[in-house]
C-alpha cells in the first residue's frame, strides 16, 4: 500500500469477515471476567457482532464505535495480520524490532 493511498486497510478476522484497521482499539483474549462482562454488556446494547461462524471465541476485537466483535482466530493471528496490513514501512520496523534493532 502506498503512503498517499487513502483506501481503508481491512483486516481479515476469519471466515471472510473483515474489520477496518483504523477503527480497532484493542484485540484481546476472551477468558477473563472483565472480557466476559464486556461481551454481555455489548450484547445487551446491541453492539455485539459474532464473526465466529459457530466456533469457539478465541479473540475479541473492540472498535472505536463501541462494537465488540467475536472472532474464532487467536488474538496473535489477528495482530500479525494487523501489522502486515499497515504497509511496508512498518514491516521493516517490525522485523528490526524482532532482531533487537530499531
Image: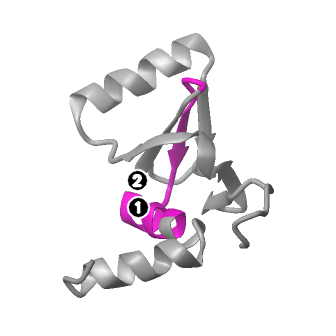
Residue 32 on the magenta segment: no
**Mark 2 falls on what kind of element?**
loop
Q: Which residue is mark 2?
A: 58
**Residue situated in front as seen by the camera: 11 or 87:** 87
Q: Residue at x 60, y 40 (%)?
A: 23
Residue 4 shown left or right of residue 23 in the figure = right
Residue 46 point in image, percent of width and height: 63, 17
Q: Is residue 32 above or below residue 41?
A: below
**Residue situated in front as seen by the camera: 101 or 37:** 101
Residue 79 on the magenta segment: yes
Residue 85 point in image, percent of width and height: 60, 68
Residue 97 shown left or right of residue 61 in the figure = left
Q: Residue at x 43, y 62 (%)?
A: 79
Q: Residue at x 39, y 76 (%)?
A: 93
Circle 2: is it few (<14), some (14-19), or many (20+) Cα within 10 Å? Answer: some
Asked whether disc 2 touches disc 1, contact meaning CB atoms under 8 Å apart, the reply is yes
Q: Which residue is mark 1?
A: 74
Segment colored magenta? 65-82
Q: Is residue 13 above or below residue 32?
A: below
Amino acid at each position: 500500500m502506498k503512503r498517499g493511498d487513502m483506501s481503508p486497510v481491512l483486516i481479515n478476522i476469519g471466515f471472510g469477515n473483515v474489520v477496518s484497521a483504523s477503527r480497532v482499539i484493542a484485540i484481546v483474549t476472551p477468558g477473563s471476567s472483565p472480557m466476559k462482562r464486556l461481551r454481555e454488556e455489548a450484547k445487551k446494547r446491541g453492539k455485539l457482532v459474532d464473526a465466529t461462524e459457530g466456533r469457539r471465541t478465541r479473540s475479541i476485537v473492540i472498535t472505536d464505535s463501541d462494537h465488540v466483535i467475536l472472532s474464532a482466530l487467536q488474538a496473535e493471528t489477528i495482530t500479525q495480520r494487523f501489522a502486515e496490513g499497515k504497509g511496508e514501512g512498518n514491516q521493516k520496523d517490525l522485523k528490526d524490532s524482532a532482531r533487537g534493532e530499531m
